[in-house]
Amino acid sequence: MALRYSLEIDFRRWLSNCFVNWFALAGHCRKKIFRSCDRYVSRLKSLIWTTGLLAGLALRAEVPSAIAIKDAHIVTVSGEDLPKATVLLRGGLIEDVGAQLTIPADAWVIDGAGLTVYPGFVNGLSNWGLPVAPVAARGTAATATTEPRVHGPEDRPQNYSYERAADSVTPADTKLEAARAAGFTSSATFLDRGIFRGLGAFIDLAGEKGREMIVAEPIGQEISVTRGAGFGRGFPSALMGYLSYVRQMFLDLNQYQEAKALYAANPVGLHRPEYDHTLEGLEESPRLLLPAVESQQIERMLVFAPELKKPFALYGLHEAFKDIDLLKQANVPLLVSLKWPEKPRDADPTDVPSYRELELRAQAPSVPGLLAKAGVKFAFYSDGVDSAADLKKALKKALDSGLTRADAIRALTLTPAEMYGVADRTGSIAKGKIANLVVMKGEAFDDKTTVEYVFVDGMQFKPSKESQQAAPGAGRRPSLDIAEEEIDGDRL
Amino acid sequence: MRKILLLLAAVCSLNAQTFLIRNATILTVTKGTIENGSVLVENGKIAAVGKNISAPTGAPVVDGTGQFLMPGIIDCHSHTAIEGGVNEGSVSDSSMVNIKDVLNPTDINIYRALAGGLTVSNVLHGSANAIGGQTIVVKLRWGKNAQQMIFEGAKPGIKFALGENPKRQGYPPQGFGLTGPTLERRYPGTRMGVEDVIRESFNEAKIYQAQWEEYRTKTARGEKVIAPRKDLRLEPLVEVLNGQRYVHAHCYRADEILMLLRVADDMGFKIRTLQHVLEGYKVAKEIAAHGAGASTFSDWWSYKIEAYDATPYNAALMTKKGVLVSLNSDSDELQRHLNLEAAKVMRYGGLSQDEALAMVTINPAKQLGIDNSVGSIEVGKSADLVLFDQHPLSGYSKPLKVWIDGNQYFDRAKDLEARADFAKKKKVLLDKEATPARGPRGGAATEGPSQ
């Protein structure tokens, strides 16, 4: 990380990438030249890409070892608000911040006049950074096979509790560029299949390799409990089935841990406890993330979750405007979805929605403001809102509905870092923390404000105007790693 | 000032549970009818029932002149207020699931049922499988949360089902005629198999019970042993064996009713209620001998083969053979007028008014083991009361006021009054949605009429 800005290292890496690509192409042509035309084209594409980057090296060569943003308004979040101060970044970290900093000679200086510096925004729960290609669902092939019936919790249906998001994180995810353009530098990232969705990772939203992006892991286990998948798909099919399954898993975990401890103390004369990877996954989870969107679901989860005897956070919370006091009392971390409920676009015009639906759509964006006013800690999560413009719009809606700018910034930075136990290294602008910053022209959430720079792990990005408006995936390919990835596997 | 207001509010809420209903026809159900009678409610309980009762100073008085007061109606078979599916039908024994987990106190059908005089519901799992989920008795305390709706002290139950529904084996998940992976079919496919599932589950429950007993004996002796796995599926069945949980069994045909009674006798547990039990009239003696209650429909049948050999005299015939009978709704709609369902047993079977009202009050209360606190107007019972404008067994009657534990949860006059205001509030929201807020690029918000 410290060598990120070293010209020689970068140069060597890209040069070698380039060679490797040429080599791979040559080998490819020799062995299976006519086997797959598509592959050939894709290799060629990546080759052009790599060569293009090599040409752009002249630009990179000028990236200095330290960057100072001078005379900017710095919103540190953890400390005082600094109306005119300097923040100094070096080696991927915040070297110092303050009004009276001496700027070292080797630092590049960005004039911060008119600029506001915030800690990089954190997405409290998403699949950002994970491969886009969907994991093939079981039995999608058009063959008349018969799936075995799940007989209950002991068959561990839809259970991926042991899978680590950190193992799949890749900078190739096209959503990252859009995220950065909206000012996001980090995300609590979880895999998105099954009921037990696996061990999440707190990641930074840029890097040359996935493993460089991991800030902390495992940070928790997301449990998806839907309203019920319906008849005929095997256990569980109803909401009550989901809940009893989750409950049984944690009872099993309890017994598993007791049995393992007893056996470890002295195995003689004891039948060894059977290994269960799904329980290992739960055992490793420092906290659970449980869904609760509507009022009765929030109340239900606050009764149900303590049974599981693990710290937990709730996500969703659109109808929490009815439960502010209850949530204050419960004092659990909350993740508010940015996908505000809206009138369906293709709704039958003769259908009159219920009062409750209307109320939910009207009042959901007021939840963050109400929580903040009551002193309840919360963070935001994208919930499928992925484009920079949409993220900005969604946040703006919360501000228009009563959330103050300062509370919004906290909910986007230090609070999620605290929730996931990484506030010692990120989430605010303080000496020694990771250089995750967003620099805006103007103040955050104002209509005319633009994101000027984003620093992720000290890496500087300058989001284009288009990327701040475009939908995810639009525009150029953002990843620097695609060439390498292609040789490893068959991505693209 | 704020504190005084709060104090005032606290005093008021206490007083709300103390009031007098005066000069109404009191249908006590268990102790006859009192013309021009009064009922005094104190702290949510019925404190006095009689002719000449005066209200304590300051207590509100409800004038019931020309009106009829009856105990809150009780439904022994409901699926109202269940969120996310009534059946965990994926397995033939889903006793691990619990309706208590998925009560939805915001279901509007609760309020609509209240408006029909219903105050207590036995909320059941569906009948998709031989052994369904755990069940719960609720009081329809509209506006309270799920925990506050649970009937304190009422014994929980479990749903069983016999016949056509539990022997269905599932459908191809992608529809008929399509190729693609299908789910392995569910066992059982016959009525014999249904019996087998129940027997097997209880055999497992007995083994499970023995394992835990062995574990407890060994640990008591100081031996080092690993505890058996706590199994949420078998726990409730052990509770059934120990008499701590009621069995409510969905059934239709006489043969399957006898089958279940035999299985219960073999395994050593009791069937608390037989639900639907349309052919109960054929085996009423056997049902009475087992001690099971019967909760049936007044005059609903022929909706499937096993429901053909039915008669509206069923309730009366079973009653005359000594079976404790109630009438249930099994429906969000029917639960709003169970008083009229009760009236039908006078037409079909010639039961008395009190016997008819008992079908939807004290009898279901007895079946659910809650007759010590609800089901009739008696001193000491909870003030679960319904005030009708006419005799509740008349087709012209309407509930005017409904109380649970002395708290008023429905008032027809107030409901009608609030409608205009509510419609206005809804219109504001609808209008707001119809005119979307102007975005930053849609031009600055200008004054003047919006489109």
Image (spheres, rainbow, N blue to C red):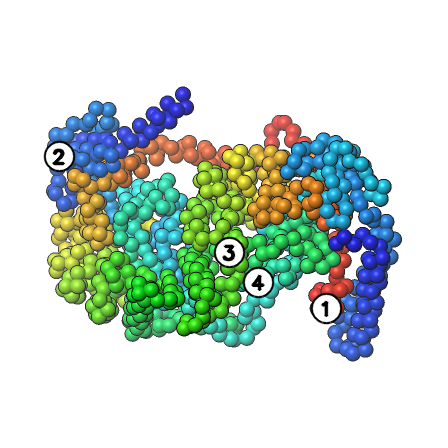
Q: Foreground residue, A381 or A19?
A: A19
> Which residue position is annotated with label 2?
B50
> Which residue position is annotated with label 4?
A163
A366 to B193, vertically: above or below: above
Q: In the image, residue A149 lies at what x, y percent?
A: 44, 70
Is A159 left or right of A430, judged from the image as shown?
left
Whether labels 1 and 4 belong to a single chain: the reply is yes
Whether labels 2 and 3 belong to a single chain: the reply is no
Which element is circle 3 on? Answer: strand
Whether labels 3 and 4 belong to a single chain: the reply is yes
Q: Which marked residue is nearer to the observer: mark 2 or mark 1?
A: 1
What amino acid type should be assigned to the residue bearing mark 2? Gly
Whether labels 2 and 1 belong to a single chain: the reply is no
Q: CA distance from mark 2 to mark 1?
A: 89 Å
| Proximity of marks 2 and 1: CB atoms separated by less than 8 Å | no
- Residue A488 got which mark? 1
Q: Residue at x 38, y 50 (%)?
A: B103
Quadrant of the drawing holding the N terminus of chain B: top left
* Crowding at mark 1 (Cα within 10 Å: few <14, some 14-19, many 20+): few
The answer, for residue A433, to whether it is visible in the render is: yes
Total numbered circles: 4
Which chain is home to disc 2? Answer: B
Q: Which marked residue is nearer to the observer: mark 2 or mark 4?
A: 4
